[in-house]
Image: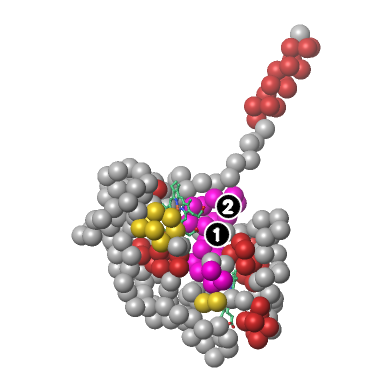
Amino acid sequence: MKKLALLMTVVALVISTPIIKAQTIVGSAHDFSTQTWNTSGEICKVCHTPHNGSMLPEAPLWNHQLTTATFSLYTSSTMNAVVGQPDGNSKLCLSCHDGTVALENFGGVTNGTNKMLPGDLGYIGTDLSNDHPVSFTYNTALATTDGQLFDPSVHLSGITPSGTIATDMLFAGKVQCASCHDVHNSVAGTASLLLKSNAASALCLTCHDK
Ligand code: HEC
Ligand code: HEC
Ligand code: HEC
Ligand code: HEC
């Protein structure tokens, strides 16, 4: 009997040991599989397609209509970087988040009506003047000029064991939306689809030497 009890305890322990699993896009804010406007019911298809996608350098097999809006940009007297109109993956994010393109405008559809509206979770609009700047080059020279930024080519990101800010967070050398966010929600323990937890501003302090 004692042996059986021990065995039962061991079995119970094995069953209850939590399995540490990475988060995924399933069930995240970007899982549109159950939206009425997504008749395919597929998750990836709203943004990527296995066939006849757009071959953009910033994302493979892109399937969503792109924004053509002109954005108001962040400016400030203390900023050293030169910010341009959104490009790279930022333009892809804004193709839903600026509210000008309907969510269901993918796979060649261009007449959708479901746009993100002011007040919706995640609505950013075309006014980026009060948002963290994106689509600008962040390199050693900028860090030197600014004096309070880490050198992106040597400073570790803390995201991968030996990756730097440049290798893990920049896209063609630029800060973009995906420098702070993971659109696929694959980083465990973060809210707001962040690339790295911002507890105690850890995300901000990865680049800002404050
Ligand atoms: C809401 C839009 C969206 C959805 C849904 C989405 N992706 Fe992406 N994906 C992007 C964007 C934007 C990028 C480029 C930015 C980046 O790499 O983070 C990207 C990049 C990628 C890349 C290349 C970079 C990398 O992370 O390896 C792959 C592969 C990819 N997606 C696969 C998928 C698959 C598979 C699915 C479905 C399970 C999916 N994506 C769902 C928007 C999306
Ligand atoms: C296909 C349209 C689409 C694209 C492309 C897209 N998003 Fe979203 N995103 C949405 C919608 C819609 C929501 C709000 C979902 C809801 O109401 O729950 C959302 C929500 C979010 C949220 C809030 C998540 C939360 O849990 O609070 C973040 C952050 C976000 N998106 C960032 C991004 C970034 C960064 C990109 C590009 C790398 C991107 N999105 C690309 C449609 C999109
Ligand atoms: C410098 C880092 C950084 C960049 C760049 C960035 N974000 Fe965010 N974003 C955050 C953080 C951190 C949050 C979490 C909420 C907070 O702390 O205010 C957030 C929250 C969000 C949310 C959730 C809704 C909300 O307002 O809280 C959306 C949607 C979003 N970001 C989209 C984007 C898009 C689209 C871009 C590119 C145009 C972008 N972000 C660029 C750091 C960033
Ligand atoms: C991937 C690196 C990176 C991350 C992460 C990041 N930033 Fe930045 N941020 C920059 C760079 C580079 C600039 C441009 C600084 C300049 O040129 O003066 C900047 C600019 C800014 C500015 C404008 C500075 C000015 O002089 O007007 C503010 C404010 C700011 N960041 C705050 C934040 C906050 C808050 C967070 C965390 C939510 C954050 N940043 C995360 C890289 C980053």
Instruction: Give coordinates of residue 7: x percent, y percent.
Output: 73, 16
> Mark 1 sits on what residue?
194
Label 1 residue SS: loop
Residue 168 falls inside the magenta stretch: no
Specify which label sits upstream in the sequence, 1 or 2.
2
Instruction: Give coordinates of residue 167: x percent, y percent.
Output: 62, 63
Instruction: Give coordinates of residue 69: x percent, y percent.
Output: 32, 74
Is the C-beta separation of discs 1 and 2 under 8 Å? yes
Instruction: Give coordinates of residue 195: x percent, y percent.
Output: 57, 59
170 lies left or right of 60: right
Q: Which residue occupies 20% across, 60% down?
A: 111
Quadrant position of the C terminus in the picture: bottom right
User: Which is nearer the eye, 6 or 159?
Assistant: 159
The numbered disc on residue 187 is: 2
Residue 123 in view (yes/no): no
Residue 179 falls inside the magenta stretch: yes
User: Which is nearer the eye, 18 or 26?
Assistant: 26
Q: Which residue occupies 44% across, 58% down?
A: 59
Quadrant position of the N terminus in the picture: top right
Residue range highlighted in magenta: 172-191
206 lies left or right of 71: right
Extreme residue in the bottom direction:
77
Looking at the rendered structure, the kind of residue marked 1 is Leu
Ligand 4 occupies quarter = bottom right
Q: Badge 1 local density, few (<14 within 10 Å), some, or many (20+)?
A: many
Residue 109 in view (yes/no): yes
Looking at the rendered structure, the kind of residue marked 2 is Val
The numbered disc on residue 25 is: none
Q: Which residue occupies 72% across, 21% down?
A: 9
In the rendered view, would you say 81 is above or below 179? below
127 lies left or right of 12: left
Residues at marks 1 and 2, CA–CA distance in whole angstroms: 7 Å
